[in-house]
Image (cartoon, grey):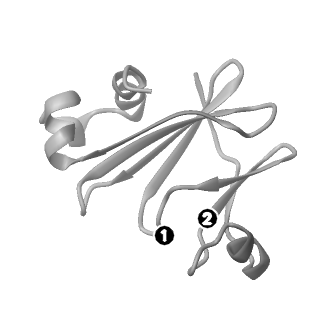
């Protein structure tokens, strides 16, 4: 697993409409793919490349949630997704989740994909 830094941008008005959104979301651009993200503007987004997939870790420490999406590198389809709120994070990941490295969070969250 290697961290990568692909472009992330705000959706265009046409993309927002095509995804049936009221407000523009975020899009990850990787190789020939444009992947809509389930992240807000104030979320921390970290992307890692696995053998044939991207692991997208989304955290928001202020609100207290964490998410992990695994996306196929070839077609951009979601392989798996998990989203936890703070009370769930403590049960599933541990109460010290705020001090954990992103790689540790991804390994622990991968069990729930």
**Quarter that holds the C terminus:** top left
CA distance separating discs 2 and 1: 8 Å
Residue 23 image-quadrant placement: bottom right
Q: Which mark is residue 26?
A: 2
Residue 12 lies, with reference to residue 95, above or below; the image says below
User: Which one is nearer the viewer's eye here, 53 or 4?
Assistant: 53
Q: How many marks?
A: 2
Q: Which x, y percent locates residue 21?
A: 59, 74
Closer-to-camera residue (88/98): 88
Along the line of sight, which residue is nearer the eye, 78 or 101? 78
Residue occupying the point 74% across, 40% down: 76
Which residue, given by chain and number where applicable, does mark 1 sit on?
A: 41
SS type, badge 1: loop
Per the image, label 2 sits on a secondary structure element best described as: strand
Residue 42 placement, left or right of 80: left
Left or right side of 90 for 81: right
Q: Is residue 55 above or below residue 58?
A: above
Residue 75 image-quadrant placement: top right
The image quadrant where one finds the N terminus is: top right
Tell me which residue sits at (40%, 22%) in the image.
107
Residue at 67%, 66% in the rendered image: 19
- The quadrant in which residue 87 appears is top left
Determine contact: label 2, label 1, CB under 8 Å: yes
At label 2, counting other C-alpha atoms closer than 10 Å, the crowd grade (few under 14, some 14-19, many 20 or more) is: many
Q: Position of residue 108 (x, y in %)?
A: 34, 23
Residue 92 in the image: above or below residue 47: above
Give the crowd class for mark 1: few <14, some 14-19, many >=20 residues within 10 Å.
few
In the rendering, at what x and y percent does residue 56 appear? Answer: 54, 41
């Amino acid at each position: 697993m290697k961290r990568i830094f692909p472009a992330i941008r705000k959706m265009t008005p046409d993309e927002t409409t095509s995804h049936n959104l009221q407000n523009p979301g975020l899009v990850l651009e990787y190789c020939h793919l444009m992947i809509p993200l389930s992240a807000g503007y104030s979320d921390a987004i970290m992307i890692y490349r696995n053998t044939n997939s991207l692991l997208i870790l989304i955290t928001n420490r202020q609100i207290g949630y964490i998410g992990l999406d695994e996306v196929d590198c070839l077609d951009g389809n979601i392989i798996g997704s998990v989203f936890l709120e703070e009370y769930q994070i403590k049960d599933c990941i541990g109460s010290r989740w705020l001090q954990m490295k992103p790689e540790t969070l991804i390994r622990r969250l991968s069990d729930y994909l």
